Amino acid sequence: MMYDKNSAGSIMTIEYVSLKRDWTVAEALDHIKEFGKDKEIIYTCYVESEYKQLLGFVSLRTLVVADKDALINDIMETDLVYFSTSDDKEEVAQAFTRYGYIAIPVVDREHRLCGIITFDDVMDIVEDEATEDIHKMAAINPSEDEYLDQTPWQLAKNRIPWLLILMISATLTSGIITKYNFILSQFLILSSFIPMITDTGGNSGSQSSTVVIRAIATGEIGLRDGVAVIFKEFRVGVICGVVLSAVNFLRLLIFTQADIKISFLVSLTILCTVILSKLMGAILPLFAERINLDPAIMASALITTIIDSVVLVIYFGLASIILGI
């Protein structure tokens, strides 16, 4: 039977050991000795009904230590994890990496055992998914080909679209600076702090987005955890922001002899920037997941571009208030 290439059915194997519920332990061990040598694994044996429906499983260890006259029905475990043949294979891979399974059975719509998926079967999926996420986080369109097998043109083609998007997006930043040029004309020193402020915002947002994207990818968090994640990143942002702004305030006063208003302005901007960046780093990947986009696209490059624009508005807005412009 043919299964969709992205389904659990496409990666399962039929090389497993099946047992009947009315067999004794002795009969089961004899069966394993006779047929187990060609199977994928024998550490876990699956119990089927006469209609091949999955009933439970029993480990080889349990069989070895059990009474030889005991029935499989009496010693099997019925609380087991299984997947459907139509389930997404990436969900299967997440289950393996999150819970450390050795093998998981696969059933059809009638709950008949069709095969098993082992950890070895999903290793390539885990690696491919991680590679794809890394590419997207670096604003590169993923490719199925190996790096050395791709021509320079192929590599450039995968990178140019996102570079164009980010370049065009960056024009918004220059537009904001132009709009508030009247502030810079009166306080030229403010321009020297722009790189530090935007870099701090980008770095803060990238930290949060990287952690959240990875947690989503591994299934550690989902949309149901959105509020908790956002609130936690807010608290992290407050702590980091207070520390960074305090250090910066002292640095400006001691080493640059900057005006106290300027020092306060820059430090307050950093506090607001870090908090906002942490929040955006958490919210944007969750939003992408909510609208069925890959959260990895909301990674460092894109988030940094968005944060740069927002941070500059905050910076110049605070400047107009604190400096009375």
Image: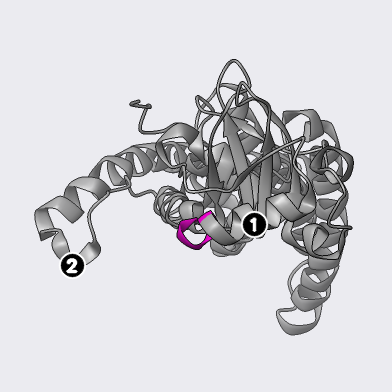
Q: Residue furthest top?
A: 110
Residue picked out by circle 1: 30
Q: Quadrant of the N terminus?
A: top left
> Horizontally, is 194 left or right of 1 in the view?
right
Instruction: Give the amino acid type for the residue marked by disc 2 in the picture.
Output: Leu
Q: Which residues are magenta?
A: 35-39
Q: Could you say whether the residue bearing mark 2 is in a helix, strand or loop?
A: helix
Q: Residue at 73%, 71% (x, y): give it.
A: 258
Residue 181: image x %, image y %?
50, 43
The reply to whether residue 205 is visible in this rendering is no
Query: In the rendered image, which quarter is residue 265 located in?
Result: bottom right
Residue picked out by circle 2: 148
Q: How is the image coloured?
A: one colour
Q: Is residue 40 above or below residue 8?
A: below
> Horizontally, is 164 left or right of 108 in the view?
left
Q: Residue at 75%, 55% (x, y): give it.
A: 26
Residue 176: image x %, image y %?
50, 38
The reply to whether residue 144 is visible in this rendering is yes
> Horizontally, is 60 left or right of 38 in the view?
right
Gap between marks 1 and 2 measured at Cα: 51 Å
Q: Nearer the viewer, residue 56 or 154?
A: 56
Instruction: Give the amino acid type for the residue marked by disc 1 in the picture.
Output: Asp
Q: Residue at 54%, 58% (x, y): give it.
A: 34
Q: Earlier in the sequence, mark 1 or mark 2?
A: 1
Query: In the rendered image, which quarter is residue 42 located in?
Result: bottom right
Magenta span dominant secondary structure: helix
Q: Is residue 98 above or below residue 267?
A: above
